[in-house]
Image (cartoon, grey):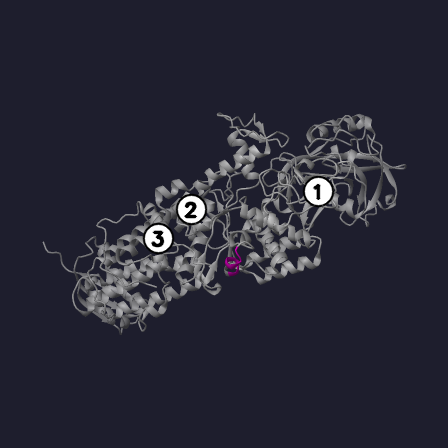
């Protein structure tokens, strides 16, 4: 509720400088943004806040999108809701490991014993990283993330995020690990999670599997090599960019309707250099117009190879190892002599040697033809992905289950999307899934799989009989914890056990942020008050990863959506219209901007962007925000400095009522915009009125407001009423300057005040009156400006003509006083298409 106004205490020289430090401390001390968990669900607005990845520093793109969320949180709080607005740190996963490796100059070697006295090098050398045990490595991860997280929190407080810091969580903390492991065990029990040995996209640099959602295509230089395969009666020419995979060739394939190769279907040909007999088969995915129209199937060159291998039931001849080198032993059926020329080489070196061998055998038809083609990379990697057969954990996601896919598409239609067109991105992703979600990673700093495997009498693991803990044991680490019924001395021994060595993909934890933050199973009362959440705010680029995976996990566990609304932010673009990202090296860190221009100015720039729209970074727009915040200070100082207003002062003057009638419309439009998660439209409409209020209304009523009597009381009451409403309209976007001004004359925080409603503004005013009268005053002032005289110069006579002239009559005294007009004539009979004012200046006194 709004407190009664008190006698204003206005600084003589108000300033924006220092407001952040002042109010951040006050808000924390007063618990302004503390979540009230005693409120019933219908009075709560719950936000599933994105936990930023803790891997160095935040950039202006983070400030951009998180400001959007904060405007909604502040608006909902002013609407009287208890806002559940937590913050989390996404501190596990590859980005943290890479940062630790570079920062401390170390690398993890799980075979090494733990050193309790280890300290990283005083002068780290990223090129000569010191090997350390897994436990030592994890301790360094925890040490560095604690430093990074403190810096993140300081920046979020500086920008004014109204989160409740008592709700802070981390994705590697005990709570998050227990939630992720519990959800996995339930997925496993229901048959939604499974272990499988299959072709896997593999990053050879990081030695880890990669999921479909983490891929990106990059244009990469390469070359087409035309190879000569041999049939008994002809030579078959094959174009390939990967001749080094020739020993992995298991078949040739052409389209079933391709007349050129129909006579070969069902026959065999011999591979060049190796002379291995491989069948020629037909498949609909073969492209007759690509190269020679016939391709070799290798295990595995790309994802199409995997499809052909699976659907045509072909054998496996794997040659690429997890380290990105060709394996030491030739695959079954491949001659060891020629293969020895390739064994142990990197893919690049093996390719060069294979081309030499093809030249020597006469099986290279012409010279390689340079091309640039899209190649799949891990989004954080620097080398092309390989496909390696590995044992991995998967969660069913509809990629191979049409019924589940339809259920997830239906969930997308249940969700309210802001802006609505973003739903198409979700649907395109779900419809394009070609496999289940691979959730295991061969890394170290992550949530371990809560699984052990029994060893048989030969010491071999029984992967078909995983041992799982009871939920009350969670969280666990199978590398140090012991499964029920075993003892530690049985680890790694025949008839004993081993722990699963892998960790979960970071998205497998982040997909459970509603459960982690909301206390799923650990705090049932809280979870019932917040789940399903009201809002998921996020970037549009991670609809396929974070949004989809969260919908999937909630659908499987709770048979519901995790939230009712999704609000999508766009990207921040650099001056060349490229997305800002750390990998591109074009990011701008925000702290300098916040110090130089002020947090409100930076928030203004962020909030000016439409939901879902990519926006260029512009300091010019930040400067506009600074000017607006400064104007709010100065205009407020003027309004509050006009003198006291009697509690029962009536607003009676037509111009005052006109201004407030226009403000009623602004309140309605801003409310509708915020209800639709369109912070930009709410800001644009409020800002436009504010400048109209300052430049037109204030100038028009200034003289009357300085006076005495009912007219002066009406002006001062109208000014303070408008100021109260405007401060509250601006508060979600410009929290510091609005709180500062509010404190000059009101008790409590503006951010706990009620959102303005039309009912608190007097009805009956004509918005057109202020508009036409302000236009008349602008023309009077323009005439003075053109004559190069003071705005206070006397006007001997002013004649108003045209549409709206009759309306001006109700504000004639205000117009005469504001323009210093001696004689004002309203020519209502004159015919004119637009309002005009003929101005005769008084003769200058010599």
Q: Check the image and report above or below for 644 versus 218.
A: below
Specify the quadrant that holds the C terminus: bottom left
Alpha-carbon neighbours of circle 2 within 10 Å: few (<14), some, or many (≥20)?
some
Q: Does the magenta stretch include residue 525?
A: yes
Q: Check the image and report above or below for 71 versus 485.
A: below
In the picture of the structure, the residue carrying the numbered disc 3 is: 30
**Residue 58: x %, y % from top left:** 46, 42
Say which of 259 and 147 sits in front: 147
Judge whether residue 624 can be spotted in this image. Answer: no
In the picture of the structure, the residue carrying the numbered disc 2 is: 156
Q: Residue furthest left?
A: 846
Q: Check the image and report above or below for 442 versus 421.
A: above
In the picture of the structure, the residue carrying the numbered disc 1 is: 453
Q: What element carries label 2?
A: helix
Which stretch did the figure color magenta?
Answer: 523-528
- Indicate which disc, 2 or 1, sits on the residue closer to the N terminus: 2
- Indicate which disc, 1 or 3, sits on the residue closer to the N terminus: 3
Q: What element carries label 1?
A: strand
């Amino acid at each position: 509720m709004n407190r009664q106004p008190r006698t204003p205490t206005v600084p003589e020289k108000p300033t924006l400088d220092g407001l952040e430090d002042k109010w951040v401390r006050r808000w924390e001390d007063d618990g302004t943004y503390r979540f009230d968990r005693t409120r019933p669900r219908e009075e709560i607005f719950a936000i599933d806040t994105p936990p930023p990845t803790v891997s160095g520093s935040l950039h202006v793109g983070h400030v951009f999108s998180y400001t959007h969320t904060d405007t909604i949180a502040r608006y909902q709080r002013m609407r009287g809701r208890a806002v559940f607005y937590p913050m989390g740190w996404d501190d596990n996963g590859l980005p943290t490991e890479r940062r630790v490796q570079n920062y401390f100059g170390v690398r993890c070697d799980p075979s090494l014993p733990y050193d309790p006295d280890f300290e990283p090098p005083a002068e780290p050398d990223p090129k000569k990283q010191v090997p350390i045990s897994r436990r030592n490595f994890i301790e360094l991860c925890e040490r560095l993330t604690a430093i990074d997280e403190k810096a993140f929190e300081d920046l979020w407080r500086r920008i004014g995020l109204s989160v409740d810091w008592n709700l802070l969580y981390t994705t590697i903390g005990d709570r998050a690990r227990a939630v992720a492991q519990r959800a996995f065990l339930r997925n496993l029990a229901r048959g939604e999670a499974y272990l499988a040995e299959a072709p896997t996209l593999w990053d050879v640099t990081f030695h880890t599997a990669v999921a479909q959602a983490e891929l990106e295509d990059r244009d990469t230089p390469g070359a087409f090599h035309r190879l000569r395969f041999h049939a008994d009666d002809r030579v078959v020419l094959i174009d390939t960019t990967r001749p080094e995979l020739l020993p992995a060739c298991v078949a040739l394939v052409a389209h079933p309707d391709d007349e050129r190769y129909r006579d070969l279907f069902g026959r065999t040909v011999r591979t060049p250099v190796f002379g291995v007999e491989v069948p020629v088969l037909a498949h609909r995915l073969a492209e007759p117009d690509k190269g020679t129209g016939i391709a070799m199937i290798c295990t595995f060159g790309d994802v199409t190879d995997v499809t052909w291998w699976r659907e045509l039931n072909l054998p496996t001849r794997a040659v690429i190892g997890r380290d990105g080198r060709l394996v030491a032993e030739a695959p079954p059926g491949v001659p060891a002599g020629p293969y020895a020329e390739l064994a142990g080489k990197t893919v690049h070196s093996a390719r060069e040697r294979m081309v030499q061998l093809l030249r020597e055998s006469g099986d290279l038809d012409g010279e390689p033809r340079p091309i640039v083609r899209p190649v799949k990379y891990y989004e954080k990697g620097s080398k092309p992905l390989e496909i390696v057969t590995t044992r991995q954990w998967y969660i069913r996601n509809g990629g191979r289950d049409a019924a589940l896919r339809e259920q997830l598409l239906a969930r997308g239609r249940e969700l309210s999307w802001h802006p609505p067109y973003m739903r198409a991105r979700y649907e395109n992703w779900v419809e394009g899934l070609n496999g289940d979600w691979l959730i295991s990673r061969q890394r170290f700093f992550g949530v371990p799989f809560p699984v052990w495997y029994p060893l048989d009498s030969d010491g071999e693991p029984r992967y078909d009989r995983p041992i799982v803990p009871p939920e009350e044991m969670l969280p666990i680490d199978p590398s140090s914890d012991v499964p029920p019924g075993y003892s530690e001395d049985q680890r790694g021994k025949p008839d004993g056990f081993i722990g699963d060595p892998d960790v979960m993909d970071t998205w497998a934890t982040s997909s459970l942020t509603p459960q982690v933050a909301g206390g799923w199973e650990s705090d049932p009362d809280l979870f019932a008050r917040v789940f399903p959440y009201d809002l998921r705010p996020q970037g549009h680029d991670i609809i396929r990863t974070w949004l989809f995976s969260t919908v999937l996990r909630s659908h499987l566990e709770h048979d519901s959506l995790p939230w009712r609304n999704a609000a999508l932010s766009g990207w921040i673009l650099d001056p060349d219209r490229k997305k800002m990202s750390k990998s591109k090296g074009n990011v701008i860190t925000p702290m300098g901007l916040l110090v130089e221009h002020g947090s409100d100015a930076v928030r203004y720039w962020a909030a000016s962007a439409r939901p879902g729209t990519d926006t260029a970074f512009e300091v010019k727009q930040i400067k506009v925000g600074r000017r607006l915040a400064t104007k709010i200070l100065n205009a407020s100082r003027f309004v509050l400095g006009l003198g006291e207003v009697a509690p029962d002062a009536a607003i009676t003057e037509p111009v005052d009522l006109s201004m407030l009638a226009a403000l009623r419309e602004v309140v309605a439009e801003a409310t509708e915009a915020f209800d639709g998660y369109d912070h930009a439209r709410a800001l644009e409409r409020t800002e436009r009125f504010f400048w109209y209020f300052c430049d037109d209304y204030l100038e028009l009523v200034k003289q009357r407001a300085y006076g005495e009597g009912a007219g002066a009381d009406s002006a001062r009451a109208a000014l303070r009423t408008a100021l109260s409403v405007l401060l509250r309209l601006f508060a979600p976007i410009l929290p510091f300057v609005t709180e500062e001004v509010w404190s000059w004359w009101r008790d409590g925080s503006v951010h706990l005040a009620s959102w303005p409603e039309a009912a608190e503004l007097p009805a009956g005013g004509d918005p057109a009156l202020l508009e036409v009268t302000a236009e008349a005053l602008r023309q009077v002032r323009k005439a003075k400006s053109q004559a190069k005289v003071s705005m206070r110069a006397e006007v001997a006579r002013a004649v108003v003509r045209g549409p709206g002239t009759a309306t001006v009559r109700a504000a004639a005294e205000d117009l005469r006083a504001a323009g210093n007009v001696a004689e004002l004539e309203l020519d209502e009979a004159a015919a004119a298409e637009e309002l005009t004012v003929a101005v005769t200046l008084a003769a200058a006194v010599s």
